């Protein structure tokens, strides 16, 4: 059984992504990264990415992490805060700490492709 299945499949991923963006957009240190962003489109990409990362049989067909985040000036602190908000959303949706740790392990290698800035957006 994949982590995707353990967490509850597509319905669970959709709920996690919705809660995640609710948390992120409520964070004054992160909301500026999403100015002029089509959130419905972004959520759809995020659901596909998270599903694929967790082992769903459908693949992720979006851009690579480096290309998708280029020019946004994302700092290491912002990346860590986003991962924290994802962990919180997973816990809010019933994930165990072990499952949250597995997700964090999947995300850690992406940090060098996403982080490019050292100063906050604001």
Image (tube, rainbow, N blue to C red):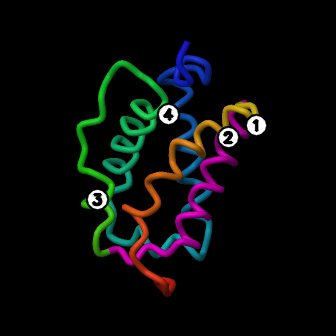
For disc 2, the neighbor class at 10 Å (few under 14, some 14 to 19, many from 20) is: few
Residues marked 2 and 1 touching at CB (< 8 Å)? yes
The residue at which mark 4 appears reads as 14
In the image, residue 98 above or below residue 17: above
The residue at which mark 3 appears reads as 68
The residue at which mark 2 appears reads as 101
The residue at which mark 1 appears reads as 97
In magenta segment, residue 6:
no
Q: Main secondary structure of the magenta part?
A: helix
Looking at the image, which is closer to me, 81 or 98? 98
In the image, residue 94 above or below residue 105: above
Relative image position of residue 113 (x, y in whole percent): 37, 61
Residue under the point 54% across and 63% down: 25
Tell me the distance, in whole angstroms, between the alpha carbons under discs 2 and 1: 6 Å
For disc 1, the neighbor class at 10 Å (few under 14, some 14 to 19, many from 20) is: few
- Label 1, secondary structure: give it: helix
Relative image position of residue 82 (x, y in whole percent): 56, 60
Residue under the point 51% across and 70% down: 31
Residue under the point 25% across and 60% down: 67
Tell me the distance, in whole angstroms, between the alpha carbons under discs 1 and 3: 29 Å
First of labels 3, 4 by sequence position: 4
- Label 4, secondary structure: give it: helix
Furthest residue in direction top, as rendered: 1
> Which one is in front in this view, the residue at disc 3 or the one at disc 4?
3
- Label 3, secondary structure: give it: helix
Apparent side of residue 7 relative to residue 39 in the rendered image (left or right): right
Quadrant of the frame with the N terminus: top right
> Which one is in front in this view, the residue at disc 4 or the one at disc 1?
1
In the image, residue 103 above or below residue 55: below
Read off the magenta span.
72-94
Relative image position of residue 30 (x, y in whole percent): 54, 71
For disc 3, the neighbor class at 10 Å (few under 14, some 14 to 19, many from 20) is: few
């Amino acid at each position: 059984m994949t982590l995707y299945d353990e967490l509850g499949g597509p319905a669970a991923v959709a709920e996690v992504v919705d809660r995640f963006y609710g948390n992120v957009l409520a964070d004054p240190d992160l909301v500026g990264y999403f100015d002029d962003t089509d959130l419905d489109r972004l959520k759809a990409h995020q659901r596909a990415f998270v599903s694929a990362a967790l082992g769903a049989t459908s693949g992720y067909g979006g851009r690579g992490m480096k290309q998708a985040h280029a020019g946004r000036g994302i700092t290491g602190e912002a990346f860590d805060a986003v991962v924290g908000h994802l962990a919180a959303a997973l816990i809010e949706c019933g994930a165990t700490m072990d499952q949250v740790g597995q997700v964090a392990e999947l995300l850690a290698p992406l940090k060098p492709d996403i982080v490019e800035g050292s100063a906050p957006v604001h």
